[in-house]
Protein backbone atom coordinates (compact mmCIF):
# COMPACT_ATOMS: atom_id res chain seq x y z
CA UNK A 1 0.00 0.00 0.00
CA UNK A 2 1.52 3.30 -1.12
CA UNK A 3 3.68 1.79 -3.87
CA UNK A 4 4.27 5.17 -5.53
CA UNK A 5 5.78 6.78 -2.42
CA UNK A 6 9.33 6.90 -1.12
CA UNK A 7 8.97 3.67 0.90
CA UNK A 8 6.82 2.05 -1.80
CA UNK A 9 9.30 2.60 -4.63
CA UNK A 10 12.22 1.47 -2.47
CA UNK A 11 10.24 -1.64 -1.51
CA UNK A 12 9.78 -2.44 -5.20
CA UNK A 13 13.57 -2.11 -5.65
CA UNK A 14 14.00 -4.70 -2.89
CA UNK A 15 11.35 -7.00 -4.38
CA UNK A 16 12.84 -6.77 -7.88
CA UNK A 17 16.10 -8.15 -6.46
CA UNK A 18 14.40 -11.10 -4.73
CA UNK A 19 12.01 -12.59 -7.31
CA UNK A 20 12.27 -16.10 -5.83
CA UNK A 21 11.32 -14.84 -2.40
CA UNK A 22 8.80 -12.04 -2.95
CA UNK A 23 6.01 -11.59 -5.48
CA UNK A 24 3.72 -8.59 -5.76
CA UNK A 25 0.01 -9.42 -5.55
CA UNK A 26 -1.41 -5.91 -5.08
CA UNK A 27 -0.13 -2.38 -5.67
CA UNK A 28 -1.93 0.72 -4.42
CA UNK A 29 -1.41 4.40 -5.15
CA UNK A 30 -3.42 7.52 -4.55
CA UNK A 31 -2.81 10.15 -7.25
CA UNK A 32 0.21 9.02 -9.26
CA UNK A 33 -1.68 7.00 -11.86
CA UNK A 34 1.15 6.93 -14.43
CA UNK A 35 3.68 5.58 -11.97
CA UNK A 36 1.19 2.96 -10.75
CA UNK A 37 0.60 1.83 -14.35
CA UNK A 38 4.34 1.61 -14.97
CA UNK A 39 4.81 -0.42 -11.77
CA UNK A 40 1.91 -2.73 -12.68
CA UNK A 41 3.37 -3.38 -16.12
CA UNK A 42 6.72 -4.26 -14.59
CA UNK A 43 5.58 -6.36 -11.61
CA UNK A 44 2.36 -7.83 -13.08
CA UNK A 45 0.39 -7.92 -9.81
CA UNK A 46 -2.93 -9.65 -9.48
CA UNK A 47 -4.61 -6.27 -8.86
CA UNK A 48 -4.05 -2.55 -8.39
CA UNK A 49 -5.99 0.09 -6.48
CA UNK A 50 -5.97 3.76 -7.42
CA UNK A 51 -7.21 5.82 -4.46
CA UNK A 52 -8.32 8.77 -6.55
CA UNK A 53 -11.50 7.45 -8.17
CA UNK A 54 -11.39 10.01 -10.98
CA UNK A 55 -8.30 8.17 -12.36
CA UNK A 56 -9.99 4.75 -12.46
CA UNK A 57 -10.89 4.75 -16.18
CA UNK A 58 -7.44 6.01 -17.10
CA UNK A 59 -5.67 3.23 -15.17
CA UNK A 60 -8.11 0.58 -16.40
CA UNK A 61 -7.62 1.66 -20.00
CA UNK A 62 -3.82 1.62 -19.69
CA UNK A 63 -3.84 -1.91 -18.22
CA UNK A 64 -6.57 -3.44 -20.40
CA UNK A 65 -4.03 -5.63 -22.16
CA UNK A 66 -2.39 -6.84 -18.95
CA UNK A 67 -3.87 -9.46 -16.67
CA UNK A 68 -4.30 -6.98 -13.80
CA UNK A 69 -7.60 -6.20 -12.06
CA UNK A 70 -8.16 -2.51 -11.35
CA UNK A 71 -10.08 -1.08 -8.38
CA UNK A 72 -10.51 2.45 -7.09
CA UNK A 73 -11.30 4.28 -3.87
CA UNK A 74 -10.54 3.98 -0.17
CA UNK A 75 -12.94 1.08 0.39
CA UNK A 76 -11.13 -1.05 -2.15
CA UNK A 77 -8.02 -0.79 0.05
CA UNK A 78 -9.91 -2.36 2.94
CA UNK A 79 -10.91 -5.24 0.67
CA UNK A 80 -7.67 -6.06 -1.11
CA UNK A 81 -5.65 -6.45 2.09
CA UNK A 82 -7.93 -9.31 3.14
CA UNK A 83 -7.47 -11.38 -0.03
CA UNK A 84 -6.20 -14.94 0.49
CA UNK A 85 -3.39 -14.40 -2.00
CA UNK A 86 -1.85 -11.77 0.31
CA UNK A 87 0.60 -12.92 3.01
CA UNK A 88 2.33 -9.64 3.88
CA UNK A 89 0.94 -6.14 3.66
CA UNK A 90 3.52 -3.38 3.43
CA UNK A 91 1.72 -0.41 5.01
CA UNK A 92 3.44 2.56 3.35
CA UNK A 93 0.58 5.00 2.92
CA UNK A 94 1.33 8.32 4.59
CA UNK A 95 -0.85 9.55 7.45
CA UNK A 96 -4.13 8.45 8.94
CA UNK A 97 -5.40 7.46 5.46
CA UNK A 98 -3.54 4.19 6.04
CA UNK A 99 -5.31 3.37 9.30
CA UNK A 100 -8.35 1.51 8.06
CA UNK A 101 -6.60 -0.82 5.58
CA UNK A 102 -3.78 -1.58 8.04
CA UNK A 103 -6.37 -2.43 10.68
CA UNK A 104 -8.30 -4.64 8.25
CA UNK A 105 -5.09 -6.45 7.36
CA UNK A 106 -4.40 -7.20 11.04
CA UNK A 107 -8.00 -8.23 11.58
CA UNK A 108 -7.61 -10.82 8.85
CA UNK A 109 -4.44 -12.18 10.42
CA UNK A 110 -1.94 -10.86 7.89
CA UNK A 111 1.64 -9.96 8.62
CA UNK A 112 1.87 -6.16 8.39
CA UNK A 113 5.25 -4.64 7.58
CA UNK A 114 4.58 -1.23 9.05
CA UNK A 115 6.09 2.01 7.73
CA UNK A 116 2.92 4.04 8.32
CA UNK A 117 3.75 5.02 11.92
CA UNK A 118 0.71 7.33 12.13
CA UNK A 119 -1.54 4.27 12.43
CA UNK A 120 0.10 3.24 15.71
CA UNK A 121 0.22 6.83 16.94
CA UNK A 122 -3.49 7.30 16.34
CA UNK A 123 -4.80 3.88 17.34
CA UNK A 124 -1.95 1.93 18.91
CA UNK A 125 -4.11 0.07 21.38
CA UNK A 126 -6.68 -0.91 18.78
CA UNK A 127 -4.06 -1.99 16.25
CA UNK A 128 -1.98 -4.08 18.65
CA UNK A 129 -5.10 -5.72 20.06
CA UNK A 130 -6.28 -6.59 16.55
CA UNK A 131 -2.88 -8.18 15.92
CA UNK A 132 -2.95 -10.17 19.18
CA UNK A 133 -6.52 -11.39 18.80
CA UNK A 134 -6.12 -12.48 15.18
CA UNK A 135 -2.66 -14.02 15.28
CA UNK A 136 -1.32 -11.26 13.03
CA UNK A 137 2.12 -9.72 13.38
CA UNK A 138 3.44 -6.20 12.97
CA UNK A 139 7.03 -5.98 11.75
CA UNK A 140 8.48 -2.48 11.85
CA UNK A 141 9.91 -0.83 8.74
CA UNK A 142 10.82 2.48 10.39
CA UNK A 143 14.61 2.29 10.70
CA UNK A 144 14.74 2.98 14.45
CA UNK A 145 12.10 0.40 15.24
CA UNK A 146 13.67 -2.11 12.91
CA UNK A 147 16.93 -1.59 14.82
CA UNK A 148 15.18 -2.23 18.13
CA UNK A 149 13.30 -5.21 16.70
CA UNK A 150 16.61 -6.67 15.46
CA UNK A 151 18.30 -6.00 18.82
CA UNK A 152 15.48 -7.80 20.63
CA UNK A 153 15.74 -11.06 18.70
CA UNK A 154 16.35 -13.82 21.24
CA UNK A 155 15.85 -11.55 24.27
CA UNK A 156 13.19 -11.69 26.98
CA UNK A 157 10.85 -8.71 27.24
CA UNK A 158 11.30 -8.58 31.03
CA UNK A 159 15.05 -8.07 30.63
CA UNK A 160 14.67 -4.81 28.68
CA UNK A 161 15.21 -1.69 30.76
CA UNK A 162 15.27 1.01 28.07
CA UNK A 163 14.72 1.62 24.39
CA UNK A 164 16.91 4.40 22.99
CA UNK A 165 15.67 5.88 19.73
CA UNK A 166 18.26 7.76 17.75
CA UNK A 167 17.35 10.91 15.82
CA UNK A 168 19.41 12.65 13.16
CA UNK A 169 18.21 16.03 14.45
CA UNK A 170 17.13 16.94 10.92
CA UNK A 171 18.31 19.92 8.86
CA UNK A 172 17.96 22.39 11.74
CA UNK A 173 19.94 20.64 14.46
CA UNK A 174 21.91 23.14 16.51
CA UNK A 175 19.77 26.17 15.53
CA UNK A 176 18.21 28.25 18.29
CA UNK A 177 14.53 29.06 18.64
CA UNK A 178 15.22 32.52 17.33
CA UNK A 179 17.04 31.26 14.23
CA UNK A 180 14.25 28.78 13.56
CA UNK A 181 11.54 31.46 13.41
CA UNK A 182 12.28 32.27 9.79
CA UNK A 183 13.21 28.90 8.26
CA UNK A 184 11.48 28.10 4.97
CA UNK A 185 9.73 25.11 3.44
CA UNK A 186 12.67 24.57 1.06
CA UNK A 187 15.17 24.53 3.94
CA UNK A 188 12.98 22.16 5.96
CA UNK A 189 12.77 19.76 3.01
CA UNK A 190 16.57 19.47 2.80
CA UNK A 191 17.18 16.50 5.11
CA UNK A 192 20.89 15.80 5.63
CA UNK A 193 20.77 11.96 5.60
CA UNK A 194 17.51 10.62 4.24
CA UNK A 195 15.47 11.19 1.09
CA UNK A 196 11.82 10.67 2.12
CA UNK A 197 8.28 11.83 1.39
CA UNK A 198 7.49 15.48 2.20
CA UNK A 199 5.38 14.82 5.27
CA UNK A 200 7.93 12.72 7.16
CA UNK A 201 10.70 15.12 6.07
CA UNK A 202 8.90 18.07 7.68
CA UNK A 203 8.18 15.91 10.73
CA UNK A 204 11.93 15.27 10.95
CA UNK A 205 12.69 18.98 10.74
CA UNK A 206 10.30 19.75 13.64
CA UNK A 207 11.30 16.54 15.48
CA UNK A 208 7.61 15.64 15.64
CA UNK A 209 8.80 12.52 13.81
CA UNK A 210 10.74 11.42 16.88
CA UNK A 211 7.73 12.07 19.10
CA UNK A 212 5.59 9.94 16.79
CA UNK A 213 8.30 7.28 16.91
CA UNK A 214 8.27 7.23 20.72
CA UNK A 215 4.55 6.41 20.52
CA UNK A 216 5.20 3.87 17.79
CA UNK A 217 7.79 2.17 20.01
CA UNK A 218 5.48 2.24 23.01
CA UNK A 219 2.93 0.11 21.13
CA UNK A 220 5.24 -2.05 19.03
CA UNK A 221 7.33 -3.17 21.99
CA UNK A 222 4.76 -2.85 24.86
CA UNK A 223 7.05 -0.46 26.64
CA UNK A 224 6.03 2.29 29.11
CA UNK A 225 6.94 5.82 27.99
CA UNK A 226 9.39 6.25 30.92
CA UNK A 227 11.51 3.48 29.42
CA UNK A 228 11.87 5.12 26.01
CA UNK A 229 14.41 7.86 25.43
CA UNK A 230 15.66 9.88 22.48
CA UNK A 231 19.29 10.45 21.56
CA UNK A 232 20.41 12.76 18.78
CA UNK A 233 22.95 11.07 16.50
CA UNK A 234 23.57 13.24 13.43
CA UNK A 235 25.33 10.59 11.31
CA UNK A 236 22.32 8.17 11.26
CA UNK A 237 24.56 5.09 11.43
CA UNK A 238 23.45 3.74 14.83
CA UNK A 239 19.76 3.24 14.07
CA UNK A 240 18.67 2.68 17.71
CA UNK A 241 19.66 0.82 20.87
CA UNK A 242 18.24 -1.40 23.59
CA UNK A 243 19.50 -1.44 27.17
CA UNK A 244 19.08 -4.61 29.25
CA UNK A 245 18.79 -5.38 32.96
CA UNK A 246 22.49 -6.24 33.29
CA UNK A 247 23.56 -2.88 31.80
CA UNK A 248 24.44 -4.33 28.42
CA UNK A 249 23.37 -2.28 25.39
CA UNK A 250 22.69 -3.70 21.93
CA UNK A 251 22.42 -1.54 18.83
CA UNK A 252 21.90 -2.08 15.13
CA UNK A 253 24.13 -0.17 12.73
CA UNK A 254 24.00 0.30 9.00
CA UNK A 255 24.21 2.80 6.18
CA UNK A 256 21.22 5.17 6.15
CA UNK A 257 19.26 3.37 3.43
CA UNK A 258 15.61 2.43 3.99
CA UNK A 259 15.91 -0.56 1.67
CA UNK A 260 17.67 -2.41 4.49
CA UNK A 261 14.85 -2.20 7.10
CA UNK A 262 12.26 -2.68 4.32
CA UNK A 263 13.97 -5.89 3.20
CA UNK A 264 14.34 -7.16 6.75
CA UNK A 265 10.62 -6.63 7.39
CA UNK A 266 9.70 -8.44 4.17
CA UNK A 267 12.06 -11.39 4.57
CA UNK A 268 12.09 -11.73 8.39
CA UNK A 269 13.44 -13.90 9.94
CA UNK A 270 15.65 -14.60 6.91
CA UNK A 271 18.61 -12.36 6.09
CA UNK A 272 19.33 -12.24 2.38
CA UNK A 273 21.98 -10.46 0.34
CA UNK A 274 20.64 -6.95 -0.25
CA UNK A 275 23.31 -5.79 -2.66
CA UNK A 276 23.40 -2.51 -0.71
CA UNK A 277 26.61 -0.61 0.08
CA UNK A 278 28.30 -2.01 3.19
CA UNK A 279 29.03 0.01 6.29
CA UNK A 280 32.74 0.75 6.61
CA UNK A 281 33.34 2.30 10.01
CA UNK A 282 36.84 3.42 9.02
CA UNK A 283 35.14 5.78 6.55
CA UNK A 284 33.01 7.34 9.29
CA UNK A 285 35.20 10.00 10.84
CA UNK A 286 33.11 10.02 14.00
CA UNK A 287 29.85 8.91 15.53
CA UNK A 288 28.48 11.53 17.91
CA UNK A 289 25.57 11.64 20.35
CA UNK A 290 23.80 14.49 22.10
CA UNK A 291 20.61 15.30 23.98
CA UNK A 292 17.65 16.62 21.98
CA UNK A 293 16.94 20.36 22.33
CA UNK A 294 13.31 20.29 23.46
CA UNK A 295 13.16 24.10 23.73
CA UNK A 296 13.96 24.65 20.06
CA UNK A 297 11.92 21.59 19.01
CA UNK A 298 8.73 21.67 21.13
CA UNK A 299 6.95 19.09 18.94
CA UNK A 300 8.96 16.33 20.60
CA UNK A 301 7.74 17.02 24.19
CA UNK A 302 4.24 17.81 22.86
CA UNK A 303 3.99 14.36 21.33
CA UNK A 304 5.31 12.63 24.44
CA UNK A 305 2.82 14.53 26.61
CA UNK A 306 -0.03 13.54 24.26
CA UNK A 307 1.05 9.93 24.61
CA UNK A 308 1.07 10.30 28.40
CA UNK A 309 -2.45 11.76 28.35
CA UNK A 310 -3.70 8.95 26.10
CA UNK A 311 -7.42 8.83 25.20
CA UNK A 312 -8.11 11.06 22.21
CA UNK A 313 -4.89 13.07 22.60
CA UNK A 314 -2.61 11.07 20.28
CA UNK A 315 -5.29 11.08 17.58
CA UNK A 316 -5.78 14.85 17.92
CA UNK A 317 -2.03 15.43 17.92
CA UNK A 318 -1.64 13.45 14.71
CA UNK A 319 -4.56 15.11 12.91
CA UNK A 320 -3.42 18.61 13.92
CA UNK A 321 0.12 17.82 12.85
CA UNK A 322 -0.98 16.45 9.45
CA UNK A 323 -2.99 19.63 8.78
CA UNK A 324 -0.24 21.93 10.07
CA UNK A 325 2.43 20.19 7.97
CA UNK A 326 0.13 20.50 4.94
CA UNK A 327 -0.27 24.26 5.58
CA UNK A 328 3.49 24.67 6.04
CA UNK A 329 4.12 22.82 2.78
CA UNK A 330 1.77 25.29 1.08
CA UNK A 331 3.77 28.20 2.56
CA UNK A 332 0.69 29.33 4.48
CA UNK A 333 2.17 29.17 7.97
CA UNK A 334 5.60 29.47 9.60
CA UNK A 335 7.71 26.77 11.22
CA UNK A 336 6.59 27.48 14.79
CA UNK A 337 2.95 27.61 13.77
CA UNK A 338 3.18 23.80 13.52
CA UNK A 339 3.66 23.23 17.30
CA UNK A 340 1.30 26.15 18.03
CA UNK A 341 -1.53 24.57 16.00
CA UNK A 342 -0.88 21.17 17.58
CA UNK A 343 -0.83 22.61 21.10
CA UNK A 344 -4.08 24.53 20.54
CA UNK A 345 -5.78 21.43 19.16
CA UNK A 346 -4.60 19.36 22.13
CA UNK A 347 -6.02 21.94 24.54
CA UNK A 348 -9.43 21.24 22.97
CA UNK A 349 -9.07 17.46 22.76
CA UNK A 350 -12.31 15.69 23.66
CA UNK A 351 -12.28 13.77 26.95
CA UNK A 352 -13.14 10.42 25.41
CA UNK A 353 -11.39 7.18 24.63
CA UNK A 354 -11.97 6.17 21.01
CA UNK A 355 -12.50 2.43 20.72
CA UNK A 356 -13.02 1.67 17.03
CA UNK A 357 -11.54 2.73 13.69
CA UNK A 358 -14.68 4.82 13.05
CA UNK A 359 -14.35 6.64 16.39
CA UNK A 360 -10.70 7.42 15.74
CA UNK A 361 -11.52 8.70 12.27
CA UNK A 362 -14.32 10.87 13.73
CA UNK A 363 -11.92 12.58 16.11
CA UNK A 364 -9.44 12.95 13.27
CA UNK A 365 -12.11 14.60 11.09
CA UNK A 366 -13.35 16.97 13.80
CA UNK A 367 -9.79 18.09 14.62
CA UNK A 368 -9.00 18.76 10.95
CA UNK A 369 -12.24 20.64 10.40
CA UNK A 370 -11.75 23.01 13.32
CA UNK A 371 -8.20 23.91 12.20
CA UNK A 372 -9.13 24.25 8.53
CA UNK A 373 -12.11 26.47 9.45
CA UNK A 374 -9.89 28.83 11.38
CA UNK A 375 -7.50 29.06 8.40
CA UNK A 376 -10.17 29.64 5.81
CA UNK A 377 -11.49 32.73 7.65
P1 LIG B 1 5.23 9.41 0.42
O1 LIG B 1 4.50 10.70 0.54
O2 LIG B 1 6.46 9.38 -0.39
O3 LIG B 1 4.25 8.28 -0.15
C1 LIG B 1 2.97 8.10 0.37
C2 LIG B 1 2.24 7.01 -0.38
O4 LIG B 1 0.91 6.96 0.12
C3 LIG B 1 2.11 7.26 -1.89
O5 LIG B 1 2.09 6.04 -2.56
C4 LIG B 1 0.76 7.95 -2.00
O6 LIG B 1 0.15 7.81 -3.27
C5 LIG B 1 -0.03 7.19 -0.95
N1 LIG B 1 -1.13 7.99 -0.40
C6 LIG B 1 -1.11 9.28 -0.03
N2 LIG B 1 -2.32 9.68 0.42
C7 LIG B 1 -3.12 8.59 0.32
C8 LIG B 1 -4.50 8.38 0.59
N3 LIG B 1 -5.31 9.34 1.06
N4 LIG B 1 -5.01 7.15 0.36
C9 LIG B 1 -4.23 6.15 -0.13
N5 LIG B 1 -2.91 6.31 -0.41
C10 LIG B 1 -2.38 7.51 -0.19
O7 LIG B 1 5.51 8.94 1.91
P2 LIG B 1 6.73 8.04 2.45
O8 LIG B 1 6.92 6.86 1.59
O9 LIG B 1 7.86 8.91 2.76
O10 LIG B 1 6.14 7.59 3.87
C11 LIG B 1 5.15 6.59 3.99
C12 LIG B 1 5.02 6.25 5.47
O11 LIG B 1 6.25 5.67 5.91
C13 LIG B 1 4.78 7.46 6.37
O12 LIG B 1 3.94 7.11 7.40
C14 LIG B 1 6.17 7.80 6.91
O13 LIG B 1 6.12 8.41 8.18
C15 LIG B 1 6.79 6.41 7.01
N6 LIG B 1 8.24 6.39 6.93
C16 LIG B 1 8.86 6.84 5.80
C17 LIG B 1 10.24 6.83 5.71
C18 LIG B 1 10.93 7.22 4.46
O14 LIG B 1 12.16 7.06 4.36
N7 LIG B 1 10.27 7.73 3.45
C19 LIG B 1 11.07 6.37 6.86
C20 LIG B 1 10.31 5.89 7.96
C21 LIG B 1 8.94 5.90 7.98
P3 LIG B 1 0.43 8.85 -4.50
O15 LIG B 1 1.86 9.24 -4.42
O16 LIG B 1 0.10 8.03 -5.70
O17 LIG B 1 -0.50 10.00 -4.33
MG1 LIG C 1 12.36 6.71 11.55
Image (tube, helix red, strand yellow):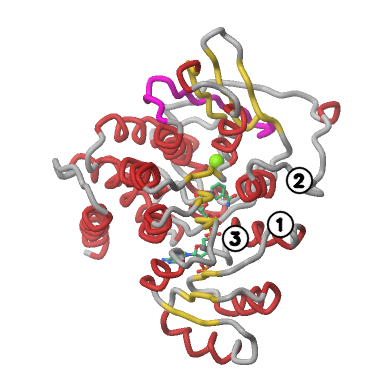
Q: Residue furthest left?
A: 351
Could you tell me residue 359's position as x and y percent? 21, 54
Please state which of residues 247 and 177 is positioned toward the viewer in this rendering.
247
At horizontal 60% and vertical 25% (from top left) the residue drawn is: 154
Identify which residue is drawn at 66% across, 77% down: 38
The magenta stretch is: 222-237
Q: Are marks 1 and 2 in contact (CB under 8 Å)?
A: yes
Vertical placement of 150 versus 333: above or below?
A: above
Say if the magenta span includes residue 164: no
Decide if residue 314 is in sight here. yes
Residue 363 circle label: none
Q: Nearer the viewer, mark 2 or mark 3?
A: 2
In this rendered view, identify the residue nearer to me: 328 or 209.
209
Crowding at mark 1 (Cα within 10 Å: few <14, some 14-19, many 20+):
few
Residue 140 % position (x, y) = 53, 43
Question: Looking at mark 3, is its residue's CB closer than 8 Å to ligand 1?
Answer: yes
Q: Which residue is mark 2?
A: 272
Query: Residue beneath label 1, please?
Result: 21
Q: Residues within 10 Å of mark 3 (few under 14, many from 20)?
A: many
Quadrant in which the C terminus is drawn: bottom left
Q: Residue 358: image x %, image y %? A: 24, 58
Q: In terms of secondary structure, where does tag 1 sit?
A: loop
Amino acid sequence: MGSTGSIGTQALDVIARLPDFLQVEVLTAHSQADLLIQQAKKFQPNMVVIGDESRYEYVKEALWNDDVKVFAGARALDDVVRMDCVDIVLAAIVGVAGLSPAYRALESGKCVALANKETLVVAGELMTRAARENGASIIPVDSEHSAIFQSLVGEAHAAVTRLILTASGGPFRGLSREQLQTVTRAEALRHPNWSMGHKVTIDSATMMNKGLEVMEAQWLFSMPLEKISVLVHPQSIVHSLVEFEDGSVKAQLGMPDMRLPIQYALTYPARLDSGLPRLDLTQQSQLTFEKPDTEAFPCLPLAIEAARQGGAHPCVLNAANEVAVGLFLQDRIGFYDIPRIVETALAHAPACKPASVAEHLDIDRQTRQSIIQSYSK
